[in-house]
Image (cartoon, rainbow, N blue to C red):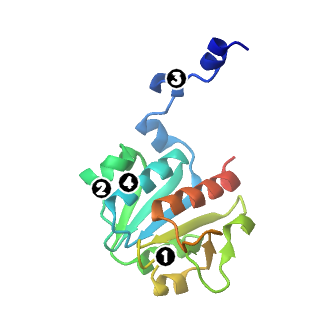
């Protein structure tokens, strides 16, 4: 393959070639059975990033709790780039109320947190017929202990460096991708 042919082979696609669906089509499209709960996530940039990731992997819904700001918000929009319009979302003042509702509706609820006996994400096996919720916490304090206690279990991402945590939006991307791989048809 010549250099010019090789360069054309790896040519970046333009927006039209990506064949993205409209917001209306997204809302009507099947979703993976996953709800993402943000427990007091303070950064609007992180919230926007989670919206964008949830759009990319057709997550069913985002639940914002506590100090997690809801759309519309200019800072959320900077990173969500419109995903706040496509992904269904709700707000609960208290995450415990959201957890109770999710459990009543048959969801298995996981806090994404390092705890005694937490499950390693790499060993997690999901039932494709199940419904799931994952809770991501505050950038400094993580998921509140009462929320951890109300969860069915906890998941942690294995880490091998000197730091003990990842940014909440990075964590969301890793966890949502893993759930998507296991739950998508």
**Circle 4 Cα neighbour tier, 10 Å, few/some/many (<14 / 14–19 / ≥20):** many
Give the label, 4 or 1, closer to the camera: 4
Q: Viewer-proximal residue, 93 or 112?
A: 112
Describe the element under mark 2 as helix, strand or loop: loop
Q: Are marks 4 and 1 in contact (CB under 8 Å)?
A: no
For the point 62% across and 12% down, the residue is: 4
Whether residue 72 is visible to the viewer of this picture, yes or no, is no
Which corner quadrant of the image does residue 151 belong to? bottom right
Label 4 residue SS: helix
Disc 4 target residue: 48
Question: Along the horizontal axis of the image, is 141 left or right of 117?
Answer: left
Q: Which mark is residue 99?
A: 1
- In the rendered image, residue 121, in percent from the top left (x then y), is placed at 67, 67
Q: Disc 4 or 3, which lies upstream in sequence?
A: 3
Q: Position of residue 58 (x, y in %)?
A: 54, 48
Quarter of the rendering occupied by the N terminus: top right
Q: Using the image, determine if residue 5 lies above or below residue 11.
A: above
> In whole angstroms, how far apart are the C-alphas of marks 4 and 3?
25 Å
Mark carried by residue 71: 2
Residue plotted at (25% across, 51% down): 74
| Marked residue nearer the N-terminal end (1 or 3) | 3
Give the numbered dot on residue 17. 3
């Amino acid at each position: 393959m010549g250099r010019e042919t090789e360069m054309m082979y790896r040519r970046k696609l333009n927006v039209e070639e990506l064949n993205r669906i409209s917001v209306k089509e997204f809302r009507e499209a099947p979703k993976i059975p996953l709800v993402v709960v943000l427990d007091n996530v303070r950064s609007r940039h992180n919230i926007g990033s989670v919206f964008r990731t949830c759009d990319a992997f057709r997550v069913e819904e985002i639940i914002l709790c506590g100090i997690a700001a809801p759309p519309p918000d200019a800072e959320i929009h900077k990173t969500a780039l419109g995903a706040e319009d496509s992904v269904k979302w709700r707000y609960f003042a208290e995450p415990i109320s959201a957890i109770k509702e999710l459990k009543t509706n048959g969801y298995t609820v996981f806090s994404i947190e390092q705890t005694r006996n937490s499950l390693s994400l790499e060993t997690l096996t999901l039932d494709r017929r199940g419904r799931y919720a994952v809770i991501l916490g505050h950038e400094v304090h993580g998921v509140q202990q009462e929320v951890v206690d109300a969860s069915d279990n906890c998941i942690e991402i294995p880490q091998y460096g000197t730091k003990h945590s990842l940014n909440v939006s990075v964590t969301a991307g890793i966890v949502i991708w893993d759930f998507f791989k296991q739950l998508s048809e």
